Amino acid sequence: MRYLSFLLLFVLITSLIGFTSCSFDELDPPKPVTLCDTLTVSFASEVMPIIQTNCAYSGCHEAGFAAGDFSTYTGLKGALDNGKMQNRVFDQKEDPNLGMPPNYAPAGNPQDLTDDELDILTCWVADGYPNN
């Protein structure tokens, strides 16, 4: 009888241990990897060519242009700091007249940024738009 009691106690204890083990704990889901987690953007080699092609060309956003000179990092940084670039390039990008570059850009100049260009600019801005 004592053996049966011991066996019953053993089964009860192992059952309790099994039910309270960490096998029922839930793990936090993994954080999704975003594009900006894997993309390191350089101002000099990636951002400035986009700006030169789409913004700071002859007659637009060059030295002396009333709406801002984007031909240098310093000029572009002012538009980033005050939110104008965020507004015009990202927030109003679908508006043909307010989004930048605008649809009224001179012939031969881009009227929209490509998805790749937007990704590069998005990650650069999200990283604090470093002058690198």
Image: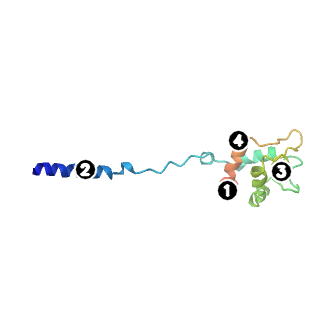
Q: Look at mark 1 in the image and give the residue it sits on.
A: 128
Residue 53 in picture, x, y percent from top left:
80, 43
Q: What's the mark number on residue 14?
A: 2
Q: Nearer the viewer, residue 59 or 12?
A: 12
Q: Using the image, determine if residue 86 lies above or below residue 33.
A: below
Measure how far apart labels 3 and 2 are at the Cα level: 70 Å
Residue furthest out toward the top: 108
Measure how far apart labels 1 and 4 are at the Cα level: 19 Å
Measure how far apart labels 1 and 3 are at the Cα level: 24 Å
Measure how far apart labels 3 and 4 are at the Cα level: 21 Å
Residue furthest out toward the bottom: 82
Mark nearer the N terminus (1 vs 4): 4
Q: Secondary structure at mark 2?
A: helix
Mark nearer the N terminus (3 vs 2): 2
Tag count: 4
Labels 3, 2: front one: 2
Mark nearer the N terminus (1 vs 3): 3
Q: What's the mark number on residue 116?
A: 4
Q: Using the image, determine if residue 80 lies above or below residue 49.
A: below
Q: Look at mark 3 in the image and give the residue it sits on.
A: 98
| Residue 116 in view, yes or no | yes
Q: Secondary structure at mark 3?
A: loop
At 38% from the left and 49% from the top, the residue drawn is 24
Mark nearer the N terminus (2 vs 1): 2
Q: Secondary structure at mark 1?
A: loop
At 78% from the left and 46% from the top, the residue drawn is 94
Figure colour scheme? rainbow
- Give the amino acid type for the residue marked by disc 2 in the picture: Thr
* Residue 69 sits in quarter: bottom right
- Give the amino acid type for the residue marked by disc 4 in the picture: Asp
Estimate how packed mark 4 is, as few (under 14), some (14 to 19) or many (20 or more) residues with alpha carbons within 10 Å: few
